[in-house]
Image (spheres, rainbow, N blue to C red):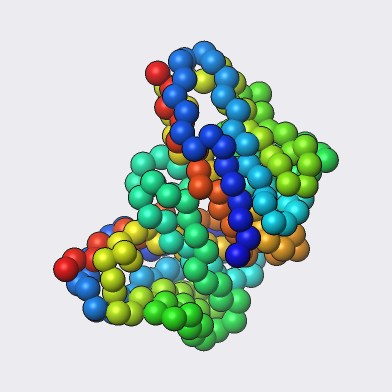
């Protein structure tokens, strides 16, 4: 199956710093990628849709200036958490549809666990 | 708006069969997906039903009834490694690329 990688897998940072998370599709091109946040024992909450070559689409309530998304190529999307605070601590997961015309099958990255001290 | 409902927890014993139900409410429906997620890991795709009926993939099967806005995931010959969270999901009702996930069902498999 399709492989999506994420880096780093785990990051601990001080409050006020910025953290960049990379999401790569390894064996297919992804014009669209999705960024989710998941708190313990909760469901996946979509934060934004990353579109190659254009601006990301953010879900209601997600601050676009705080969560910067860049989809620089057909295989790479990055999420930067700017001026991170303890409440941003969460599990961040990216995904990409194998088939750009249908997102019913999503392939997920392994996730990044962010801890902000 | 869209909503998906599934039980929060299910417990079963090894070797048993368990069914995880999912009811959904959405004005535009394209199909129902199921994902498995182990603690600390990422979700993995299990199955997708666009049409009514049962889809079988090894020990896992998924069923859909569009008229009842209902589906289920059936896990047979349960193994300890099946202990995980299971999410049903639908595509955004606008037909866009967004996927909406249910709250998830935590399955505990006991020896």
Q: Residue furthest left?
A: B111
The residue that appears at 77% across and 37% down in the rendered structure is: A72
Residues A117 and A86: in front is A117
B91 lies left or right of B41: right
The residue that appears at 59% across and 46% down in the rendered structure is: A5
Q: Is residue B24 visible?
A: no
Find residue A69 and report its image quarter.
top right
Q: Residue furthest front?
A: A27
Task: Tell me the quadrant of the picture where the N terminus of chain B can be found.
Answer: bottom right
The residue that appears at 52% across and 72% down in the rendered structure is: B47
Residues B89 and A19: in front is A19
B90 lies left or right of A96: left
The residue that appears at 67% across and 51% down in the rendered structure is: A26
Find residue B36 and report its image quarter.
bottom left
Task: Tell me the quadrant of the picture where the C terminus of chain B can be found.
Answer: bottom left
Disc tally is 0
A115 lies left or right of A96: left
| Residue A117, percent from left and from top | 40, 18
| Residue A87, percent from left and from top | 43, 25
- Residue A46 vs A115, above or below: the answer is below
- Residue B38 vs A83, above or below: the answer is below
- Residue B92 vs B47, above or below: the answer is above
| Residue A84, percent from left and from top | 51, 20
Q: Residue furthest right?
A: A53
| Residue A33, percent from left and from top | 67, 48
Q: Is residue A15 visible?
A: yes
- Residue A102 vs A38, above or below: the answer is below
């Amino acid at each position: 199956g399709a492989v999506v990688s994420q880096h780093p897998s785990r990051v601990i940072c001080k409050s006020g710093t910025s953290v960049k998370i990379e999401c790569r599709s390894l064996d297919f091109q992804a014009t669209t990628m999705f960024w989710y946040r998941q708190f313990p024992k909760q469901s996946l909450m979509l934060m934004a849709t990353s579109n190659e070559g254009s601006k990301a689409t953010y879900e209601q309530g997600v601050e676009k200036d705080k969560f910067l998304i860049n989809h620089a190529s057909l295989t790479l999307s990055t999420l930067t958490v700017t001026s991170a605070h303890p409440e941003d601590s969460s599990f961040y997961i990216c995904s990409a549809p194998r088939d750009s015309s249908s997102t019913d099958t999503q392939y997920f990255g392994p996730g990044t666990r962010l801890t902000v001290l | 708006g869209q909503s998906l409902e599934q039980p929060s927890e299910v417990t079963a014993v090894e070797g048993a069969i368990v069914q995880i139900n999912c009811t959904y409410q959405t004005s535009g429906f394209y199909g129902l997906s199921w994902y498995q997620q182990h603690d600390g890991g990422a979700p993995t795709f299990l199955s997708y039903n666009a049409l009514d009926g049962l889809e079988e993939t090894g020990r896992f099967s998924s069923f859909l009834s569009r008229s009842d806005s209902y589906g289920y995931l059936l896990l047979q010959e349960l193994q300890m490694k099946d202990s995980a969270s299971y999410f049903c999901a639908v595509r955004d009702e606008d037909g866009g690329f967004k996927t909406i996930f249910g709250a998830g069902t935590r399955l505990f498999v006991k020896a």
